[in-house]
Image (spheres, rainbow, N blue to C red):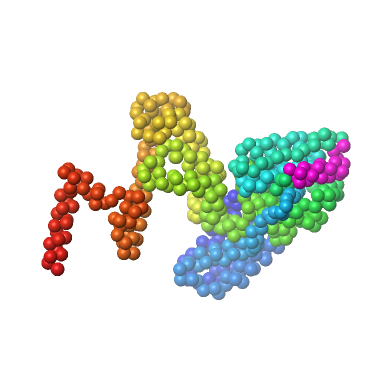
């Protein structure tokens, strides 16, 4: 995502490294390259000039903080201005009570509007919103059927307890489907259904054209008057660069928009649309599409996107993804099992599945500061995780709970069942044992840290551990032959002698 822009901005700003002070000359030199990078990223020239001028005024003469290098401080200034250019703050959907909240999606053909309806429904489902998706695109052949398939896929596959339902009237397509009244009637019927069945949200998928024309705008205005949507969102294809920005401005001038959803941003290395659309239209970006799957829709946060563009990662979004996918009670239970050294292959595969639900490994690693640039040209083989799951799936229940049961003959059976080699299975077992040992050691180190903290606070670690459900240390010391530990006895004698001398 925005790789070319990230590379060029990074190269321009690192040239300030080693300078003792940010001066007008070295800032101008760096900003000349930033300007070129932004123009090549297909950002509007007027926006580029305004952005560079603002950074120059903010940066020149600023003293370098002792803890930062000039390059680092300049990156901070550029990040602040990038956030303001795309923001300045995140804009979220709002919901009315009582429902339904009506969300109307508009856009040209080919922007991914229908798929975005499904992604938005999946996002709402995950947040407990009962959603109805209405097919008001009666222009494009099979558009109603396409949306029905998308909604059924969301209902079957997306995480969350809330229902996602579909409303379509395919009989209105065809010869009479071009009339504005047909689309309006579908929307009115969908709104009645949403109210009657107590849906929280109604999403309306409207028709598109290859370009903005009077016929399209008449239909959108008619739908808007009929159902009074609470929010009108424009779906824009980020891959078409400045054309996306121009179409967004045209839509906004003729039909006031509340927000923009940028699709296919994962395929666009330039990023001009992301940097320009808010400035040109005054309409905030609310969501970005980052992949083909239903969960590949993210709320847009300008400051986080600025961090990604500058190669600083996005740890906050990574943590939020983890919170969405990982059950807190399950995580606590797993941590307890790791403390006890009871981590099993079942737990291992659960963790892999949780991570995979968060997105591709490459996209997740790219959110870590300093890692994104390093792995940009690497080909991360996701099929390796498929092979791991296949090998674990070929084990018996007992083997998954206790990997030590797996001998040579069992290794051969597992390798045949999973279509892998004996070497692959043995490597998995070895790595699993190493990981289990490491997690157990880390748990032990954490316990030692707690004991040290108790000691510094004046508490007795032995009695504290016993109170936490841990065995009494003195009882453990007497578990040798004869019920007493000679080492412990000698320590007690020395302690008594020292006390007498005092």
Dominant secondary structure of the residues highlighted in magenta in the image? helix
Numbered circles on residues, count = 0
Q: Is residue 315 left or right of residue 144?
A: left
Dividing the image into 4 quarters, which one contains the C terminus?
bottom left
Q: Pick whichever, 270 or 235, lies toward us.
A: 235
Q: Is residue 406 left or right of residue 494?
A: right
Q: Pick whichever, 112 or 371, lies toward us.
A: 112
Question: Residue 181 colored magenta?
Answer: yes
**Residue 382 sits above or below residue 63 on the image:** above
Q: Pick whichever, 185 or 25, lies toward us.
A: 185
Q: Is residue 139 left or right of residue 349?
A: right
Residue 468 position in % (x across, y down): 36, 52
Residue 203 position in % (x across, y down): 73, 46
Quarter holding residue 39: bottom right
Q: Name the residue: 40% across, 41% down.
A: 343
Q: Name the residue: 72% across, 39% down.
A: 166
Q: Is residue 371 left or right of residue 228?
A: left
State the extent of the magenta-drawn residues as a range.
176-197
Residue 260 position in % (x across, y down): 70, 53
Question: Residue 407 colored magenta?
Answer: no
Residue 482 visible:
yes
Q: Name the residue: 53% across, 71% down.
A: 22
**Residue 403 sits above or below residue 30 on the image:** above
Residue 46 position in % (x across, y down): 70, 63
Q: Name the residue: 61% across, 46% down.
A: 126
Residue 264 visible:
no
Q: Pick whichever, 295 or 479, lies toward us.
A: 479
């Amino acid at each position: 995502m925005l790789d070319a822009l990230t590379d060029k901005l990074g190269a321009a700003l690192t040239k300030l490294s080693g300078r003792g002070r940010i001066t007008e000359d070295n800032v101008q030199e760096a900003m000349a390259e930033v300007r070129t990078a932004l123009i090549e990223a297909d950002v509007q020239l007027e926006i580029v000039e305004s952005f560079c001028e603002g950074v120059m005024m903010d940066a020149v003469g600023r003293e370098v903080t002792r803890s930062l290098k000039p390059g680092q401080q300049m990156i901070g200034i550029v990040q602040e201005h990038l956030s303001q250019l795309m923001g300045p703050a995140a804009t979220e959907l709002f919901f009315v009570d009582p429902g339904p909240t009506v969300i109307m999606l508009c856009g040209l053909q080919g922007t991914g509007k229908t798929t975005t309806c499904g992604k938005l429904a999946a996002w709402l489902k995950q947040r407990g919103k009962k959603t109805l998706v209405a097919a008001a695109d009666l222009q494009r052949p099979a558009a109603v059927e396409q949306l029905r398939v998308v909604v059924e896929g969301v209902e079957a596959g997306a995480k969350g307890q809330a229902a996602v339902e579909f409303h379509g009237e395919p009989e209105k397509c065809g010869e009479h489907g071009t009339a504005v009244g047909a689309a309006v009637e579908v929307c009115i019927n969908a709104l009645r259904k949403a109210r009657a069945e107590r849906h929280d949200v109604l999403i309306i998928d409207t028709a598109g054209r290859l370009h903005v024309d009077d016929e399209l705008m008449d239909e959108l205005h008619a739908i808007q008057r009929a159902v009074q949507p609470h929010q009108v969102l424009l779906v824009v294809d980020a891959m078409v660069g400045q054309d996306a920005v121009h179409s967004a401005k045209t839509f906004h001038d003729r039909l006031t928009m509340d927000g923009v959803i940028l699709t296919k941003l994962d395929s666009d290395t330039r990023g001009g649309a992301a940097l320009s659309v808010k400035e040109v239209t005054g309409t905030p970006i609310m969501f970005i599409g980052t992949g083909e799957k239903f969960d590949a829709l993210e709320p847009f946060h300008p400051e986080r996107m600025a961090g990604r563009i500058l190669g600083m990662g996005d740890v906050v979004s990574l943590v939020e993804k983890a919170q969405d996918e990982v059950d807190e009670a399950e995580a606590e239970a797993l941590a307890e099992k790791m403390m006890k050294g009871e981590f099993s292959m079942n737990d291992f595969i659960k963790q892999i599945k949780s991570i995979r639900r968060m997105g591709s490994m490459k996209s997740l690693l790219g959110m870590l500061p300093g890692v994104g640039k390093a792995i940009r040209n690497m080909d991360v083989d996701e099929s390796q995780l498929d092979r791991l799951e296949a090998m674990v799936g070929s084990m018996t229940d007992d083997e998954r709970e206790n990997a030590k049961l797996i001998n040579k003959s069992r290794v051969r059976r597992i390798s045949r069942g999973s279509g892998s080699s004996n070497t692959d299975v043995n490597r998995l077992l070895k790595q699993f044992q190493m990981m289990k040992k490491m997690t157990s050691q880390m748990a032990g180190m954490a316990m030692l840290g707690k004991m040290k903290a108790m000691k510094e606070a004046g508490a007795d670690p032995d009695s504290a551990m016993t109170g936490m459900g841990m065995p009494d240390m003195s009882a453990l010391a007497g578990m040798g032959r004869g019920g007493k530990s000679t080492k412990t006895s000698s320590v007690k004698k020395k302690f008594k002698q020292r006390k007498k001398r005092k």
